[in-house]
């Protein structure tokens, strides 16, 4: 009987711990959703300000998984990245790097005659672009796209076109 009571207490302890972990995960997720909503509001305000200043709607490319933007101003022939502004001609070249890392995650534990764990292997991508700028004080700009492959390739294609136009 004593062993059954210990198992009951252990089971309730595990259930309580799992419930607590789920609640913490929900709270963290809600905070992340709110943080992203605030970041989107800030980007919308920034976009309106840029449209007012330059009189044109820029091409936008999200960076840092949507938390910042690259603005391409075609008529003005300028690129805005964070608080910095460059003319098309100031951009000498660029390179794109995918800093891949392998991750192993335990996806389940099986209790039979012995304990075994299933694991899942994933490749995590972190796309980074380096711009070479015609500036002795700040010759490179690092732009992180996180795992957003579409934004990374869009930026790569646009900067290829800008470099081609400046060399023609």
Image (spheres, grey):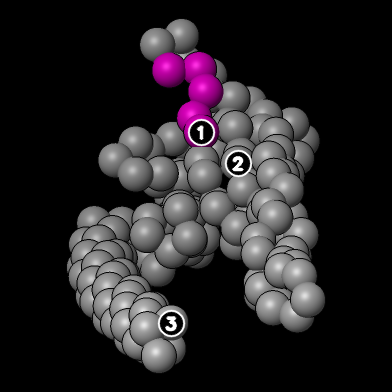
Residue 128 is labelled as 2
**Residue 142: which disc?**
1
In this rendering, the label closer to the viewer, 2 or 3 = 3
Quadrant of residue 71 in the image?
bottom left
Q: Write down the region rendered in magenta.
A: 138-142
- Kindly report which numbered mark, 3 or 1, lies closer to the viewer in this rendering: 3
Residue 160 image position (x, y, % from top left)? 73, 44
Pinpoint residue 87: horizontal percent, then vertical percent: 47, 36
Q: Position of residue 58 (x, y in %)?
A: 43, 63
Are the residues tagged 2 and 3 within 8 Å (C-beta)?
no
Of the pair 70 and 110, the residue shown nearer to us? 110
- The quarter of the image holding the N terminus is bottom left
Which residue was labeled with disc 3? 3
On screen, residue 121 versus residue 144, left or right, reads right
Q: Earlier in the sequence, mark 3 or mark 1?
A: 3
Who is closer to the viewer here, 147 or 24? 24
């Amino acid at each position: 009987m004593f062993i059954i009571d210990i198992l009951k207490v252990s089971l309730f302890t595990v259930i309580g711990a799992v419930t607590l972990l789920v609640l913490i995960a929900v709270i963290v997720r809600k905070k992340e959703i709110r943080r992203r909503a605030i970041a989107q509001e800030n980007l919308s305000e920034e976009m309106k300000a840029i449209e007012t200043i330059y009189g044109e709607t820029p091409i936008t490319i999200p960076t840092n998984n949507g938390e910042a933007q690259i603005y391409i101003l075609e008529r003005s022939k300028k690129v805005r990245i964070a608080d910095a502004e460059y003319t098309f001609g100031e951009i000498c070249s660029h390179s794109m790097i995918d800093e891949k890392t392998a991750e192993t995650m335990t996806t389940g534990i099986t209790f039979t005659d012995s304990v075994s764990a299933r694991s899942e292997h994933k490749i995590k991508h972190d796309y980074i672009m380096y711009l070479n700028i015609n500036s002795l004080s700040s010759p490179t700009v690092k732009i992180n796209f996180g795992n957003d492959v579409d934004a990374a390739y869009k930026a790569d294609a646009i900067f290829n076109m800008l470099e081609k136009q400046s060399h023609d």
